[in-house]
Amino acid sequence: MKSLKNGMYAQTEYFFKEFPFLKKHININTLSQKPRVERVDLRLLDSYGYTAEWYVKHDSSIEVVSVHFILFTKEGGSLGEVKQNRLQKFWFWKTKDIIGETVYEKIQKLQNPNQVAYIARIQKGFSVSTFFNILTDSSDTYLVLYKTPASIEFSEWLSQIKEKE
């Protein structure tokens, strides 16, 4: 973790001990800040995986941000990914936008949606130099782990949050 101080690094190591199944999907040393844990909400369920890229004129580089979601069981087994199904290119104010399934739509395709206990949101960003066509050192990775309450099934939790919002 390039930018995390020792205390934050220790907290992040503890986070990965509590959720060891995430180690298969993200390297602790690539994180730009300590991971967060949040409750599943409607905003998350309406989210798409995506990749966005844009040209930065002052240093002739291309900035790329990629976001994807992974669904997990209570035991940490992977239930699948919401693939990056939206591509946004910002080149001279022209945008190309391809839309696919949301996190909620992916969950509904599962044989048993009630198995979903965690949803990881992994965001990676990096720069590519257009002069040398190389990846620069300025890569950033962020992790948010969303979870449902352990005491109720996913479908019941979904009904409760729909009523509140």
Image (tube, rainbow, N blue to C red):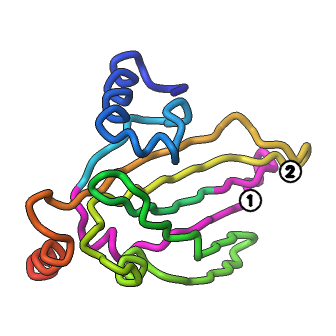
Q: For this view, does 96 lie left or right of residue 44?
A: right
Query: How much space separates mark 1 and mark 2, taking CA atoms?
Result: 9 Å
The residue that mark 1 highlights is 55
Crowding around mark 2 (Cα neighbors within 10 Å: few <14, some 14 to 19, many 20+) is some
Rendering quarter of residue 106 = bottom left
| Relative image position of residue 154 (x, y in whole percent) | 20, 71
Mark 1 / mark 2, whichever is N-terminal: 1
- For residue 39, which quarter of the picture? bottom left
Q: Position of residue 135 (x, y in %)?
A: 77, 42
Q: Does 132 sit left or right of 38 as displayed?
A: right
Check the picture and name the quadrant holding the C terminus: bottom left
| Front position in the image: 19 or 56 | 19
Residue, x 62% and y 83% (percent of image)? Answer: 98
Q: Amino acid at mark 2?
A: Thr
What amino acid does circle 1 point to? Answer: Tyr
Q: Secondary structure at mark 1?
A: strand
- Tag 2 secondary structure: loop
- Residue at mark 2: 130
Q: How many marks?
A: 2
Identity of the residue drawn at 56% across and 68% down: 50
Residue 19: name its quadrant: top left
Q: Are marks 1 and 2 in contact (CB under 8 Å)?
A: yes
Q: Which stretch appears magenta?
A: 39-64
Residue 74 in the image, given as x and y percentages of width and height: 27, 55
Q: Which residue corresponds to the image point at 66% horizontal and 56% vertical from the top-left? A: 64
